[in-house]
Amino acid sequence: MLALGVIAIPVLTATYSRRYGVAISKPAGPRSRRFLLLTLAVLLVGMVSSLAFKFLGIEPWWAFVPATIACVATIILGRRYDGAQRRELAAGAHA
């Protein structure tokens, strides 16, 4: 079931994008682009910090700190990205 779920995500995303012409990974304007890049930067820093913890020999439980920050940032920035994307798409539809 997990493998089917992982396979279904890109298939559904591509199908939805083709059918409706809107893709969640393609920002509609500058504000949504900033939120997308900021989210990606936070996730990248979280991944790099987990590698740093491993190579520096820091206790593994410290990895929860950047993981928690990345999780909270993803939730907050994801909602803001969604709102900015909706506003920019709506503004483009009326222009």
Image: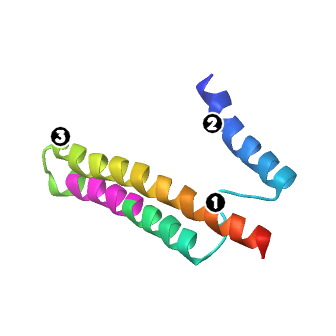
Residue 95, placed above or below residue 82: below
Is 51 magenta? The answer is yes
- First in sequence, mark 1 or 2: give its number: 2
Badge 3, how many Cα within 10 Å: few under 14, some, many 20+? Answer: few
Residue denoted by label 2: 6
Instruction: Residue 86: give its label.
Output: 1
Residue 3, placed above or below residue 45: above
Quadrant of the snapshot with the N terminus: top right
Looking at the picture, which amino acid does disc 2 mark? Answer: Val
Q: Over which residues does the magenta segment extend?
A: 43-53
Residue 54 position, x and y percent, is 23, 51
Residue 92 position, x and y percent, is 74, 72
Badge 2, how many Cα within 10 Å: few under 14, some, many 20+? Answer: few
State the predominant SS element of the stretch in magenta.
helix
The Cα atoms of the two marked residues, 3 and 2, are separated by 28 Å
Residue denoted by label 3: 61
Is 81 magenta? The answer is no
Residue 73 position, x and y percent, is 36, 54
The Cα atoms of the two marked residues, 1 and 2, are separated by 26 Å
Residue drawn where x is 21% and y is 48% of the image: 65
Of circles 3 and 1, which is in front? 1
The residue closer to the viewer here, 8 or 28, is 28
Q: Left of 20 or right of it: where is 37?
A: left
Q: Secondary structure at mark 3?
A: helix
Asked where in the image residue 7 lies, by quadrant, the reply is top right
- First in sequence, mark 3 or 2: give its number: 2
Q: Secondary structure at mark 1?
A: helix
